[in-house]
Amino acid sequence: MPVSREYIVKRLILLVVVVFGVLIITFIITRVIPAHPELLWAGAHPTEEQIEKAREQLHLNDPIYIQLLYYLRDFLVGDWGVSWRTRQPVLSDILSALPATLELVTTAFIIAIALGIPLGALAALKRNTWVDHVIRIVSVLGASVPVFWLALIFQLVFSSWLGILPGAKRVDEFIVLETGFKPITGFILLDSLLEGNFAVFVNALHHIILPAIVLAFYPFGLSARMTRAIMTEVLNELYTRSALAWGLPRRVVIYKYALKNTLAPVIASLGLSFGYTIIGAFMVELIFVWPGIGLYAAMALLSYDYPAIIGSIVLVAIFYTVINMIVDIIHAIIDPRVKL
Amino acid sequence: MIPEDIRVIFKLIKTNPVSMAGLVIVAAFLVVGLLAPFITPYPQDAWGDVYHLDQRYQPPSWAHPFGTDEMGRDMFSRVILGARFSLIIAVGVVGLALIIGIPIGLIAGYLGGKIGTTLMRITDMFLAFPPLLLAIALAATIGRGLTNTIIALAISWWPWYTRLIYVQVNSIKTLPYVDAARIVGVHPLAIMFRHILPNALTPVTVQAALDMGSAILEAAGLSFLGVGVTPPTPEWGLLVTEGWSSINIAWWISLFPGLAILITVLGFNLLADAVREAGDPRLRRILIVGRKL
Amino acid sequence: MSMKPLVVENLTIHYYTLEGIVKAVRGVSFSVDKGESVCLVGESGSGKSTIGLAIVGALPANARVLSGKILVNNVDILELSSKELEKIRGRSVSIIFQDPAASFNPLFTVGQMLSDVIRYKLGIHDKEELKKKAIEALKNAGLPDPERVYNSYPHELSGGMLQRAAIAVALSTRPDILIADEPTTMLDVTLQAQILDLLQELRRKLGLALVFITHNLGVAAGVCDKILVIYAGAMMEFGPVDEVLVNPLHPYTRKLIECVPRSSVRVGRLKYIPGSLPDLRKLPPGCVFAPRCEEAMDICREKEPPLIEVKPGHFVACHKYKR
C-alpha cells in the first residue's frame, strides 16, 4: 500500500521541528550550561586574544535569544566554525569525512541485519532448542560487548598477530598511486567498481572487513534479540493460529504472514540500531584510523577541539533524524495501521 | 507488575539455564561491587596511587592473575575495584535518570492536554539524538570526572523513563479509584504521587535496574573517548583505554577489564530478556513447553 | 448407519503451566451429524474452547492431549502428522473465533487472507477466478458490499462485518464441520441475532455439522439441536436441546437455566450460582460440582459420578440418577 502524500509531508514537517529541537538542545549545552563558553571555543590553550575573539564570534555580549538566533543562522548558512586542529572550516571537514563513515557504517549495518533478522526469526521458530540457545547467547553477547575493546582485540589478533587482515586505514596508498585511482563519490568500494579498478576494490574490501565486523556486533545483537522476541509473540497471536486453523500451510503462515508482522516493528527499530552503529563508529574509526566523521570527532574530543566536536555531533544527530524519518516511512508502507 | 509477577519471573528464570546464568552474573557483580575495597589483593595498586617500576608489564601469573600495567600495578586488583566504580556509575545514572524522568512523565501523563503534549515533545527532542551522542556533547562541555560522567549519561537517559511512566500513568489515570479520589477533592499532587505513582512505578524500576548494564557500557565508551572518568580511577573502560598504547607488548592490560565489562553487561542483558519475556502474559503461557505450532 | 462427520471420544487435555498442570478437559465425548448443531455450554474457563481448538488441531503450544479420539470423517486427527493435519484443516473442519478483530492479520486485507485460503485449499491459482470465488464467499456471508470488504484491512471494518468475513473465510473451503467459538459474545445484541441467523441458514444450506461454543444458554437454545453442559472440564449433561432445557437433570444445568434472565418473569434480582469454578490444578475428589451443589450427598464428595443414559439420548453425570 503506498503511503499518502499527506503522511510524507507531515513527516517532513516533523523532521524540521526535530532538527530545530536538536539545534536548541545543542545550543543549551554549548552556550547556556558552561559559565564561560568562550573558553571552550577558544582552543586547548587559548591566549587572551583568542578568548576575546571567541566572545565576539559567539556574540556573548548580546542577550541570550539574540545569541540563539545567530547560532541558528550560522548552522543554516553552513558557518559551523573553524576547527582548531585542522584549521579548516568544520563543515567542509565533516562533509569530506562523511563518505568514509557512510561506507563503513552501511557495510556494518548490512552485515548486522542480514545476519540478525534471519537468525532471530530462526531462534523464535526453534524456541527452546539448542539452535535457539546458541543464537540467543551470540546475539546477547553482541549487544553486551564494548565495541572499542572488541576493536582493539580484533586488531591485535587478526592484524598484529595473525597478519591476515589490515588493521588500519581504508586502502593502501601505494595501490592508489600505482593504479592511478581517482575517487568520484568518496565511496572507495563503489568508485573502484565503477572504474573497474579491481586492485583497489580488493584492497579496500580487505581493509573494511575488520572494522565493519566489529561495528556490526551491536546492531546484530539488537536486531536478532528484537526479531526473536517479536516473532515469538507473533507466532502466538490469535491471527497466526486462526490462519493455521483456516487451513493455510505452515510455511505460508510463517514466511508470508508472520514474517511481515515481525518485520514491521523490527524495521521500526532499525533507526535505533543505526544510531548505535554510527556512535560505535566514533570508537572503531579511532582505533582503525578510518578517516571518517568518527575519527574526526574522536580526535576533536581528545584535543579539546570544541567547534569540531559540536559540528560533528550536530551533523550526526541530524543524520540520525533523517534516517529515522526514512525508517518511519518504510514502516508506514508495511503497516497500514500506522498513523502520525 | 505485582509481587506475584516477580515470583513468576523468578520461577521462569530458574527453568532456563541461560537466564539463570544472567542472574548469577548480576548477583556476583553486585557482591564484588559492594565488597571490592575489602577483597582486592593489592588495595594500593587498586586505587592506583602507587607504582612499582620493577614490576611493569608482568604477564598473568599466580601473583598477578591479570598481569600488571605500565606502572607495575596489579591488574586483578584494579579490575576488582573497577566493579565498585561501575556499580556507582550504573546506580547513579539510572537513579538520576529516574529522578528526572519520573516526575516529568507523571505530570505529562496526569495533566495531559497542552502541558502534557509540550513536555512529551521536549522529551522526544532528547530522544532525537542517537544513544551516547548527547552524553558526549555534555561531557565535552562540563568536563571529565565520575560525577560529570553520571550527570552526562543521566541527561541522555531520562527520556526513556519519562515515556514509560507516561504510558503507565495514561492507563492508570482512567481507573475508577483515581476518579473517586478526584471527585472527593484529593489534591492533584497527592493523587499523582500517592495514588498513581506507586502503581506505575514497578515496570519503570525493573526496567531501570536492568538498564544498569547499558549504563556501564556507555560509561566505558565515554572513558575511551576521553570524556569519561579521570585516571587513576580504575573504571573498566578507562583501564582498557590505558592498555591500548602498550597492547602489542602487554595485551592483558586491555583484555581483562574489557572481559569484565562484557560479562557484567551480558549478565544484565540475559536477565533483561528473561524478565521481559516473563512479564508478557501471552508469552508466559508458551514458555513452558516448546511444542511446534 | 451413516458416518458422522465428527465424533469426539473420551477427550482429555491438560495444560502445562508454571503454576502446575491444568486439567482443562476430562473425558468428554460427543458426536455431531451432518446438518446438526451441538452446543458446548459452560462458564468461562470450563474447557469448552479448548475442545474447539483441539478439533481444529490448533491447541496452544503448552497443551497436551492425554487420551481420547477426535474422529473427523472417521479419521482420528490426533494420530495425524502435522502435514496431514494441514490438509484436514479448512477442508474438513474450520473455525470462527470470539474476537473477529484478533483473528485477522492486521497487515493483510481480508481479500488477501481469503484468497490465500482458497488458493491453498482449493488449488485455484488463476487470479480472476480467485477473486471471483472470494467475492462470492463474502456475499454468501451476507456482506452487502463484498468488494469493499475484500479490499479492506481489518482495522477498517466493524466487529460484525469482520465476524461475517471470518465466516466467509471459514466456509470458503466448504468444510464439513464448523466450530463456532463464542462467535457473538463480543458483538452488539442486534448483530448477535444476525450472525446467529446467518449461521443457522448456512448450516441448513450446506449441511454443516456445527459445534457451537457458548456460555449463554439462551443463545444455545436458539441455535442447537443438542446441548452438552460442561463444568470444570467434565461433562455434566448431554441431550437433545428440548429435553435438556425443559427437563434438566443435573443440578448444575438447572442452576444455569435459572440464571438466564427472562423478560416474562417479573423484574427481580438476577440469579447466580454461589461459589466459583474449582482450581483445575487441584480438583476435589468426587463430583467437581459438589462444592457448589445444594443437593450434594456424601457420595458426591467421594466418587466421581459416571455418565449414564437416563432416557434414550439423554445423558447425565450425577449420583442422583441410577441407570
Image (cartoon, coloured by chain):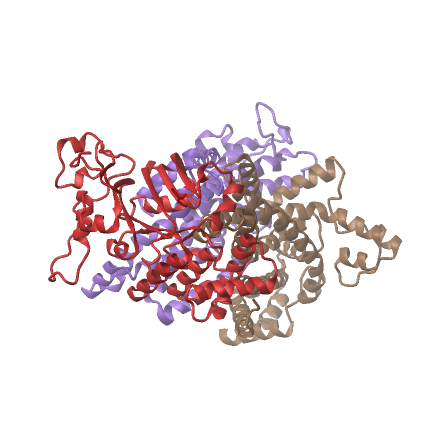
Labels in figure, total? 0
Q: Between residues B162 and C24, which one lies in front from this camera angle? A: C24
Does B102 appear above or below B286? below
Rendered position, C210 above or below C135: above
Question: Quadrant where the N terminus of chain A lies?
Answer: bottom right
- Identify which residue, A157 or A203, lies in the foreground: A203
- Which of the 4 image quarters holds residue C141? bottom left
Residue at coordinates 71% horizontally, 65% vertically from top-left?
A: A88
Q: Quadrant of residue A303?
A: bottom right
Q: Is residue B215 visible?
A: no
Chain (red): C
Identify which residue is drawn at 73% across, 38% down: A160
> Along the horizontal axis of the image, is A180 left or right of C17?
right
The x, y position of residue C238, in whole percent, is: 26, 44
Image x and y of residue B252, in percent: 62, 33
Q: Position of residue C286 (x, y in %)?
A: 21, 32
The answer to whether one can see residue A232 in this image is: yes
The residue drawn where x is 76% and y is 38% is: A163
**Residue A87 drawn at (x, y percent):** 71, 63
The relative height of residue B212 versus residue C186 in the rendered view (above or below) is: above
Vertical position of residue C41 compared to residue A185: above or below: above
User: What hue represents chain A?
Assistant: brown
Any idea which chain is the purple one in this picture? B
